[in-house]
Image (tube, coloured by chain):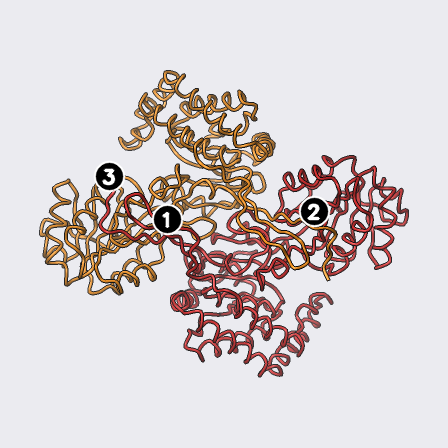
Chain colours: A orange, B red
């Protein structure tokens, strides 16, 4: 991103209000935070028309500006989607509050008692694009975890976000919490992202949600600590001993059930001894659902209609009804291919061989590694965390689906009675 | 730091050897890692003379280059210090291996079993200066936690580090682990730090240890995720109700017991109602131990020999026998002062008032917050973690003393039997 023409100080009033709000939120009882969430859900339901109208302005501008059909779909809020957002907010109210949980603790030999307690980060910054639903989701998750949120939701959703943030702020104020607990900086346009990335000390953690390009920019340029919610070049490996029915159904589910998300499979690897037995059935089932196959030479031997896969296919997150397919010589080759091309999100082996299953689980270094299960299960809701902040593909702090506790830090509470160090 | 004149690719052979070594280390049983640690300790003891000789070259060069007495002391390795290093390595062998620990897990309603398991980061980079003991400490901690280490120990300790890394590599090889599990890049001089900061993908986490200046540079410039082991502008607040004996002994211990470390107190705040009762005794005891007092006007009223504190004193980590002292109107003022000037390391309140103690613990947002205890207790050894990687002052991933488990990430293991997502 280009250097900002705004000085970083233009954010000072926003960040300083966010810091004050974060102190109130950190001290707010769960009951009050839950009342705010209920008030937000009520406000969303009571103001569907205003939300949909504002969203209509964004959709019209997006159409004029030539946004793709996919982006326009993400941008759209209709009555059903607003209702789904309200329900999601109420679900966050039902989740356990992580703040104040004691992670571990002990009594030291000198009588001092130490305990490690979950505390909010403070101020969370989120950078995303053309997804007004994220505005509501993140506001609810940040609120429940005691964090103030500063949102850069992108100019494409500016009208929608303004109305949504206004409703959220009124709901917060109605239960006595600071309205500035949730703020948007869309007024600074594209430069808002750059300003957030430079706001070290003002923003405690920055979460980019969106394209690989957006995430890479934030990771490279931010001086604020970042949690990467990353891209998924997700692999399934069909081992020699894979059950055919599982292979067919798991690959189909992993690709077709929701192809546009990060836990959908993008590359299928097949053991050469199993290719003749499995590939025709697996690929025919996919093709019948409209999947385009990009195959290496050996795989094309079993499915001549496939396009010829190029080097680029192995590194591509299609997010569409496309699948790259290769035949490999061995489990070692499959692991080698995954080490080279995986983004470290999710990989699954379909096998009945215990030793191979264990080797795959141990040697593939991804946020989630699976045996005989659909890659679509890497998801906070499926894992039982409730609503999801995103899926982290970094190794620091959080890895895999992030729930509310991943939006917290900890501090050590030390209780003494005059002890000094010898 | 200035842009590197070396292309990032000069590190490729080092990073690629480190990555290979990390795969072997991740799979190495605890028993083998412990054998390597014993072999390292044995090698240190058997080669004291060679280590001390190499260190002599660094000390001579340091003296010629005008290194300060403090830096020369940190740089020095004599027989006793080498023995202490060997003992520290053996202590790491006694610590519980974090790799493979199951953090949490559950059975999902569909029968899938998920578990979150500790895994090594992979390759850890460490940037430090003129402290050859860190070379051995970090090598031992990285090895036990299954991580390969790439060390930039600085040209001032180049000869010492070369000998130490050579001994460590031979010890690793003697038990069948890759010698490249621990490597130094001191041959690239000052630019080594810049190269590590640009090695995204090659280095999984970067840990700067040293001056605030070094740490700030790494935090701002690194594209690799960083764990900050930070500076400590540490505060003690003497509340109205503080027991005099505790006030005197805790402040003295926190300042004098080891003034050059990050958990030593740097600023003393005193409630105005307690100043007359406590300050003369507290400050006389400090002065008798050679502490220079930098006091605000009100505090000087009780200790006229004090220097006049300036704005800069409140933000200074002296790391020496100096202490800034201010009288405040209330607990609120003390918390306000701490919010403004603290680096978020450690703060302690001395009080007998339960409500004030709880407010201080809740409202001061530092890695460690204490009641009636010396700030010197913020320490991995004191907390029972064994050897310490450093004390994190960031909120992401680790906060406070970091033990072995803070050198690990996690991954999710998912075991199914053909499940697909509905």
Which chain's residue wears label 1? B
Secondary element at tag 3: loop
Q: Which residue is mark 2?
A: B371
- Give the residue at x 29% y 53%: B415
Secondary element at tag 1: strand
Secondary element at tag 2: strand
- Give the residue at x 56% y 26%: A177
The quadrant of the rendering that contains the N terminus of chain B is: bottom right
Mark 1 nearby-residue class (10 Å; few <14, some 14–19, many ≥20): few
**Labels 3, 2: one chain:** yes
Residue A269 seen in render: yes
**Labels 1, 2: one chain:** yes
The location of residue B228, given as percent across then percent down, is 56, 53
The quadrant of the rendering that contains the C terminus of chain B is: top left
Q: Which residue is mark 3?
A: B422
Q: Which one is earlier in the sequence, the residue at label 3 or at label 2?
A: 2
Give the Cα distance between marks 3 and 2. 52 Å
Give the Cα distance between marks 1 and 3. 20 Å
In which quarter of the view is residue A297 placed?
A: bottom left
Mark 3 nearby-residue class (10 Å; few <14, some 14–19, many ≥20): few
- Give the residue at x 44% y 48%: A398
The location of residue B47, given as percent across then percent down, is 58, 82
The label number, if any, that marks residue B106 in the structure image: 1
Mark 1–mark 2 contact, CB under 8 Å? Answer: no
Give the answer, above or below, for where A186 lies relative to B313.
above
């Amino acid at each position: 991103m280009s250097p900002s023409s705004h000085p970083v100080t233009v954010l000072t009033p926003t960040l300083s209000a966010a810091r004050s709000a974060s102190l109130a939120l950190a001290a707010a009882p769960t009951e009050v935070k839950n009342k705010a969430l209920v008030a937000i859900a009520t406000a969303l339901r009571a103001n569907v028309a205003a939300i949909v109208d504002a969203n209509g302005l964004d959709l019209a501008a997006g159409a004029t500006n030539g946004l793709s059909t996919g982006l326009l779909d993400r941008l759209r809020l209709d009555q059903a989607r607003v209702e789904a957002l309200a329900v999601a907010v109420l679900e966050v109210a039902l989740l356990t509050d992580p703040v104040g949980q004691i992670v571990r603790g002990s009594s030291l030999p000198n009588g001092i008692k130490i305990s490690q307690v979950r505390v909010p980060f403070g101020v969370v910054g989120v950078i995303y694009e053309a997804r007004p639903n994220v505005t509501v989701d993140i506001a609810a998750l940040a609120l429940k975890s005691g964090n103030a949120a500063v949102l850069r939701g992108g100019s494409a959703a500016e009208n929608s976000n303004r109305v949504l943030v206004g409703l959220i702020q009124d709901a917060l104020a109605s239960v006595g919490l600071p309205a500035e607990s949730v703020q948007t900086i869309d007024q600074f346009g594209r430069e808002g992202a750059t300003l957030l990335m430079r706001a070290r000390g003002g923003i405690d953690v920055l979460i980019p949600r969106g394209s690989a390009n957006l995430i890479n920019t934030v990771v490279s340029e931010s001086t604020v600590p970042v949690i990467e919610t990353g891209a998924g070049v997700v692999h399934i490996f069909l081992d020699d001993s894979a059950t055919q029915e599982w292979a067919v159904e798991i690959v189909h589910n992993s690709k077709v059930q929701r192809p546009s998300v990060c836990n959908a499979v993008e590359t299928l690897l097949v053991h050469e001894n199993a290719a003749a037995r499995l590939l025709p059935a697996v690929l025919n089932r996919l093709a019948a659902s409209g999947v385009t196959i990009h195959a290496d030479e050996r795989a094309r031997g079993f499915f001549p209609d496939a396009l010829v896969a190029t080097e680029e296919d192995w590194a591509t997150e299609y997010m569409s009804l496309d699948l790259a397919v290769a035949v490999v010589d061995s489990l070692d080759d499959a692991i080698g291919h995954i080490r080279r091309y995986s983004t470290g999100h999710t990989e699954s082996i379909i096998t009945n061989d215990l030793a191979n299953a264990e080797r795959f689980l141990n040697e593939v270094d991804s946020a989630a590694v699976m045996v005989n299960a659909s890659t679509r299960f890497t998801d906070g809701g499926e894992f039982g965390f409730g609503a999801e902040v995103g899926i982290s593909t970094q190794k620091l702090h959080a890895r895999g689906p992030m729930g509310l506790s991943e939006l917290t830090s900890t501090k050590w509470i030390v209780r003494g009675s005059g002890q000094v160090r010898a």
